[in-house]
Image (cartoon, grey):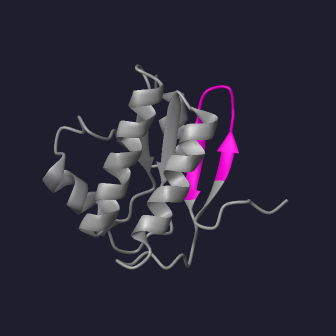
Amino acid sequence: MESPYRFFTVESSNEATIVTLRHGSPFNEATFFAVQAELLGFVEVTRPAKLVVSLQHIEAMVSSMVGVLISLKRKVVSLQPHGTVALCALNEHSQEVFNTIDPKQSLFPRYPTAGEAVATP
């Protein structure tokens, strides 16, 4: 069954909800508001306690995408006070960006795979 979401797919388990941003999604300045609205709407409806965002298909991490992820985390925490958002499958460029802005991983814990992110409490 195809995902009802334009910019991402979803996998859910008892431990976490995994959102994978779609391959080929036109993540540029013109579409970030739509991406953000769709992600925030999804979180509003599903209220995940643990959200893992897979960036495996994102080639370049730009500041607007970082802003979308920060908004997403704020929404998750506002709906689930102990909610968490983790990132996984970052390419080298995205890893460098987050190592610069969040070196201690206090904003977003980062994992090589979604499985590792889900398995970590």
Query: Taking 63 as reference, is 100 above or below it?
Result: above
Identified at 68% across, 39% down, the residue is 12
Q: Is residue 8 above or below residue 49?
A: below
Residue 58 visible within the image:
yes
Q: Which residues are magenta?
A: 10-20
Q: How many marks?
A: 0
- From this view, report whether residue 23 is shown above or below residue 66: below
Towards the viewer: 4 or 24: 4
User: Dividing the picture into quarters, in which one does residue 9 lie?
Assistant: bottom right
Identify the residue shown where x is 50% and y is 69%. 57
Rendering coords of residue 10 (x, y %): 66, 50
State left or right for residue 97 relative to residue 43.
left
Q: Residue furthest right?
A: 1
Q: Is residue 88 above or below residue 43?
A: below
Queried whether the magenta region covers residue 12, the answer comes back as: yes
Q: Quadrant of the N terminus?
A: bottom right
For image coordinates 61% across by 27% down, the residue present is: 15
Residue 6 sits in quarter: bottom right
At 31% from the left edge and 41% from the top edge, which residue is drawn?
108
Q: Is residue 92 magenta?
A: no
Give percent across and percent down for residue 92.
Answer: 31, 66
Prevailing SS of the magenta stretch: strand
Lateral position of residue 58 relative to residue 19, left or right: left
Indicate left or right for 27 with 46 as reference. Answer: left
- Decide if residue 55 is in sight here: no
Q: Position of residue 34 (x, y in %)?
A: 49, 67
